[in-house]
Amino acid sequence: MLRIEHTTRLWATLLLAAALFMVAGCKKVSGSKDSADQAAQSSGAAYVDADDTYQIKNAPMKGNADALVTIVAFSEFQCPFCARVLPTLDQVLEKHGSDVRIFFKDLPLPFHKEAGPAARAAHAAGKQGKFWEYHDLLFENQKDLNNAPYEKLAQELGLDIEKFNKDRESDEIKKLVDESEKLAGELGVRGTPNFFVNGANIRGAQPIAAFDAIIEQEKKAMKELIDAGKSKEEALAERIEKNKSAAEPEAQRPDARPEPDPKDVLYVPVDGSPVRGNVDALVTLVLFSDFECPFCKRIEPTIDQLFEEFGDDLRVVWKHNPLSFHPRAEPASRASWAAGQQGKFWEYHELVFENQKALSDDDLNKYAEELGLDMKKFQADMNSDAAKEQIKKDQALAERTKAQGTPHSFVNGRRVRGAQPYESFKKVVEEELAKAKETLSAADQKKAPYEKLQANANKGEAKMIVPEGGPARQAEPPKPVTIPVGDNVPSRGPADAKVTLVEYTDFECPFCGKFAQNLDEVLEDKEIASQVRVVVKQFPLGFHRNAHLASQAALAANAQGKFWEYHDVLWNNQKALDRASLERYAEELGLNMKKFKKALDDGTYKDQVDAEFKEGQGFGVSGTPTWFVNGVRESGALPPNIIKQKLLDAINAED
């Protein structure tokens, strides 16, 4: 946490920097280095020569230099979330025009080994007036960055390669990136993307509605201050001062974000999506769903029950929203779309949900064959650009309507989150049905009633609730605990990983064995594994008679550098954990048996096991497996997709 005195001084400098920039604009200052190159930059980029702690003078810029709203974006080129937010930033500039300017700041994260070199290459391109063009190419080729394609991309832009290579290895550009990274630390920025909008902080790849809410707030506030006689520099300084509390890392949850207005009625277009039920029904339920989501499967019987109750008064429209942490959801969506091209979407949809855990390519083909589809056409349609575009279109609609997570429904435009019980859906459908009958004439009830009912609905972005000063704050999350990790505690993964998962385990607990298997499956993703440290603590339960000795044996193996190998053997032999079996496993792994047996005979690790058990109780552990992600407690052998999402949330959260 930044000390108050330090933070005050920092923000005072930022205010002065902002004021200096407003005066300097993008004018060339005589004697500045590479000024000709900088003046030639495209896409509205410019470098500003004001000496400021915010380092604006060295930051590429898009937009109007004299704008009311300044966005400083901390980003990096290997971050998938930074790539995801790019279309949103383009929308911001298109929508708000001359009222907005955006500055790019580097924050190469340590677990992305090419992020630093990519940042230096982008600034080297900037020396030849091509920062933003090179920036776009880096993001377009994000998956290829481990192959260091920097010269190739420079050649595509027609850069002077000799100058490009010299500049990207120069001390000047290395210092530029290092100083940006240092500044991020001073401001409490720990992850990317991260934005400061006139000082108000937006964290993560938020939808445009999150930016719109703050930008509109800032435009209004700036104009009021200017109309009251303040200069633009003074107005900006006042707004930064007003918003600075929202920018400090302790001021809000890492995942704090504006929430949709629950009273907002949205028009959600059908657009040729699969429809079940009467096309002229008085009530339309638009469902954003994911074939790999267990909650989406849970809502299906509720939909069936609604049809039994409301018959021709109801129709359901399906929208694809395969979530990123469900690897087979997107192929399943494309397969269902392909089945729909042969008139079998709903039949295929039903087969996929019945077999939710079997969604390999072979499985998806098998379901198509069971339905008697033309397999050549099915496979061509499944892999077509049209299928991919439809899914992207639905996902863009989900973002625009703030349909976060699945399942997510709109009943005549009214939002219903999650797999709510039948009675909850029934109540909303009944209310909308009564409203339709009361509002529409008899003739209008018979043809396209949804469009008529939605004539006055909000057809733009979902309205957001954002208080003065920044994104909406939510209830405080559980406070994380600090769990000590000594040198003699088994761990794997980078010692400086952003995320630490501490597991309290019992080798006789079948759920612990399942959790270990699920965690291993998640860590097969190298991108996640490179950012997670796993620590194992012992918590042998009293009714498992062999668990305590198994824990001691595992620690004895750890002393000989073989904990994880021994750990895996124990999970594979949970029903054979007697002393003789424990010794046999050690011998099979080639351990020094004299040392191993002595450790068990002397109870060398008994005190450590007991201490870890007591420590766990102090942190609220009462059963196994209990695990902590950066100090936040979780429990149970959760499925891999949920474990993965919790790790991703922690990886992408701000400190």
Image: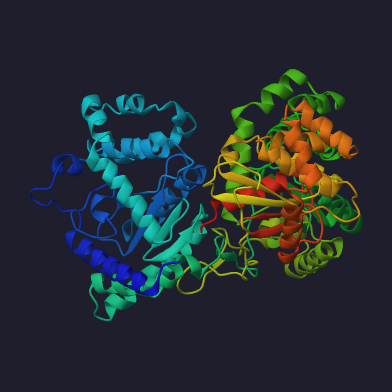
Residue drawn at the location 89% of the way across and 40% of the way down: 578
Q: Going by the picture, which residue comes out furthest to the left?
A: 30
Please, is residue 182 above or below residue 377 in the view?
below
The image quadrant of residue 167 is: top left
Q: In the image shown, does 497 or 525 lie closer to the viewer?
A: 497
Question: What x and y, as percent, mark residue 134?
Answer: 34, 35
Query: From where the camera sits, is residue 146 visible?
Result: yes
Please, is residue 526 above or below residue 406 in the view?
above
Question: What x and y, as percent, mark residue 235?
Answer: 29, 73
Residue drawn at the location 75% of the way across and 62% of the way down: 614
Question: What x and y, as percent, mark residue 125?
Answer: 28, 35
Please, is residue 323 above or below residue 166 in the view?
below
The image quadrant of residue 18 is: bottom left
Q: Going by the picture, which residue comes out furthest to the top?
A: 376
Q: Going by the picture, which residue comes out furthest to the bottom?
A: 228
Image quadrant where one finds the N terminus: bottom left
Q: In the image shown, does 500 or 27 lie closer to the viewer?
A: 500
Residue drawn at the location 43% of the way across and 72% of the way down: 245
Query: From where the camera sits, is residue 406 visible?
Result: no
